[in-house]
Image (spheres, grey):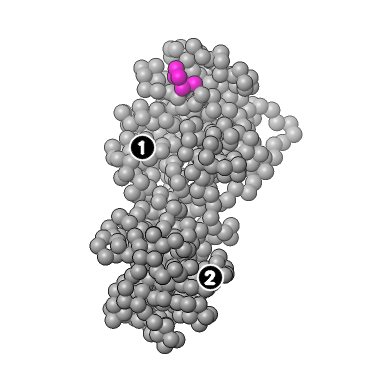
């Protein structure tokens, strides 16, 4: 999911109820009439679609019975006033409209606009289709007639603009409520909804444009955000002092790489080195320990078959990354127990997470990096339940296990104690390939070795890993390999 929004975006994210509270504050405390906010919303959306598709001359609007429908009527009126060929399809009788939405409908009709009482499958060849069916208040599965309308919108071959949020998408969780509009452009208002940026949200929202509707800053400050966006990658770590030596930048020990999975440990180790760890070692099976550094001699490799074999590498380490290629054998369990019995900061991934799920432990100085399947095992749930509400899942993981949690996937989440969750908007589908998680493990461990705290190392690591993936994907997403990130990691950390 490469970034599809302006770098001038605010970073704060909100739940739907918080945005509604901001809206009320603007009306009741600041004194901006509701119809004025609605007209500003429609004007912002119309300006955004004209900027995106300046040659478009035909527009259809699908209008619901609430304020989201009112926004769509404003867009339709402005398009009509601009000389576009406009068709409006109410999905509920206009007689059901109330308040500001009714005023917006009356304004549209007074301007000479007409409505049609049916929903054509192809919307009569319009170039742009405006989705104004449901707003952020939807919290139930979409079915029946409304589901049929949304499916018709998704068959539309032109451009789709969603107002505030794609209809059918849950504003807080980013999951589709049975069926949801798949938009090319979403113009969202007042406050950024957290569900637009994780789970299925990015797929349904398309490009996101934000408008605060010219409300004063006090509106934004009237409620507390629920999460924050990680900023786009612009600079790496500060320049090193001239007198620095390798001991200043920590020693990462990667533990893993059972027979047949040695590459996972090797990739994690190189990633730790590429982001600046002073020393990197691998503790792995003796059968291939001598082979892992043939093409990367800077890595120190140790054959480990017993706890005694692991003792010396652990004593020299400042950070441990465990899990890449670890497996679930007795050997793996022995290594995990030995690592957990140290006081070292730990990054836990892959099969180490699956083993952890069998015997829950709590720890303050570790980073757990599950994908949805691993998160499901850790919480005794299904991956579908994890994806249905990723924010809830990451908070439950942090409460249960302590430390810092990175819930991977589209819109990766970083959650730590007493900190707002962070959401990563960078990355792309090409990164859905083997080894990417191992590289992330190494990146976070390498940053921890350079004395970043757990939350900052996890947040910066997720951000850097995703940015490197986007840079590597410039040659195409298909066929993108985890090792393709190594050179971008080095370049980006040195910006």
The image quadrant of residue 156 is bottom left
Q: From the viewer's side, name the closer residue of 124 and 38.
A: 124
Residue 173 lies, in percent from the top left, at 37, 53
* Drawn side of residue 416 relative to residue 99, left or right: right
Query: Is label 1 in contact with label 2 (beta carbons under 8 Å)?
Result: no
The residue positioned 46% from the left and 27% from the top of the image is: 324
Residue 228 lies, in percent from the top left, at 48, 53
**Camera sees residue 230:** no
Element type where label 2 sits in the image: loop
User: As displayed, is residue 450 above or below residue 265?
Assistant: below
Q: Residue furthest left?
A: 144
Which of discs 1 and 2 lies nearer the camera? The answer is 2
The image quadrant of residue 443 is top right
Is residue 155 part of the magenta span, yes or no?
A: no
| Mark 1 burial class by Cα count in 10 Å: few <14, some 14-19, many 20+ | some
User: As displayed, is residue 333 above or below residue 74?
Assistant: above
The residue positioned 52% from the left and 45% from the top of the image is: 427
**Camera sees residue 263:** yes
The residue positioned 50% from the left and 19% from the top of the image is: 283
| Image: magenta residue range | 257-262
Q: Which residue is mark 1?
A: 373
Q: Which quarter of the rendering shows the C terminus?
A: top right
The image quadrant of residue 194 is bottom left
């Amino acid at each position: 999911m490469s970034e599809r929004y302006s770098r001038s975006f605010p970073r704060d994210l909100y739940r739907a109820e918080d945005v509604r509270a901001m809206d009320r504050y603007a009306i009741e405390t600041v004194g901006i009439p509701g119809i004025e906010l609605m007209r500003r919303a429609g004007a912002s959306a119309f300006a955004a679609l004209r900027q995106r598709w300046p040659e478009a001359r035909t527009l259809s609007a699908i209008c619901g019975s609430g304020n989201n429908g009112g926004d769509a009527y404003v867009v339709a009126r402005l398009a009509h006033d601009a000389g576009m060929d406009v068709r409006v399809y109410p999905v509920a009788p206009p007689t059901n409209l109330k308040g500001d939405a009714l005023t917006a409908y009356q304004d549209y009709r007074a301007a000479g606009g007409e409505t049609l009482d049916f929903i054509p499958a192809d919307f009569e060849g319009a170039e742009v289709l405006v989705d104004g069916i449901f707003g952020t208040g939807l919290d139930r599965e979409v079915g029946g007639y409304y589901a049929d309308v949304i499916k018709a919108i998704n068959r539309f071959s032109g451009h789709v603009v969603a107002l505030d949020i794609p209809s059918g998408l849950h504003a807080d969780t980013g999951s589709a409520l049975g069926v949801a509009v798949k938009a090319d452009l979403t113009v969202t208002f007042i406050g950024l909804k957290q569900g637009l940026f994780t789970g299925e949200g990015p797929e349904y929202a398309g490009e996101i444009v934000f408008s605060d509707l010219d409300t004063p800053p006090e509106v934004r400050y009237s409620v507390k955000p629920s999460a924050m966006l990680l900023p786009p990658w612009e600079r790496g770590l500060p320049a090193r002092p001239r007198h620095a030596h390798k001991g200043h930048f920590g020693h990462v020990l990667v533990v893993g790489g059972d027979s047949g999975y040695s590459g996972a440990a090797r990739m994690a180790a190189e990633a730790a080195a590429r982001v600046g760890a002073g020393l990197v070692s691998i503790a792995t099976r003796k059968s291939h320990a001598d082979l892992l550094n043939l093409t990367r001699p800077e890595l120190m490799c140790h054959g480990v078959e017993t706890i005694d074999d692991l003792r010396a590498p652990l004593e020299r380490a400042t950070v441990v990354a465990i899990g890449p290629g670890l497996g679930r054998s007795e050997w793996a369990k022995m290594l995990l127990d030995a690592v957990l019995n140290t006081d070292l900061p730990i990054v836990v991934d892959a099969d180490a997470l699956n083993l952890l799920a069998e015997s829950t432990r709590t720890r303050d100085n570790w980073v757990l990096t599950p994908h949805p399947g691993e998160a499901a095992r850790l919480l005794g749930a299904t991956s579908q339940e994890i994806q249905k509400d990723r924010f809830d899942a990451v908070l439950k993981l942090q409460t249960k296990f302590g430390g810092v949690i990175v819930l991977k996937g589209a819109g990766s989440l970083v959650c730590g104690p007493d900190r707002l969750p962070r959401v990563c908007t960078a990355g792309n589908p090409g990164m859905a390939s083997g080894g990417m998680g191992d590289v992330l493990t190494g990146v976070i461990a390498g940053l921890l070795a350079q004395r970043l705290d757990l939350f900052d190392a996890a947040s910066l690591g997720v951000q850097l890993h995703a940015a490197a993936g986007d840079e590597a994907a410039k040659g195409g997403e298909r066929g993108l390999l985890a090792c393709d990130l190594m050179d971008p990691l080095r370049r980006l950390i040195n910006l």
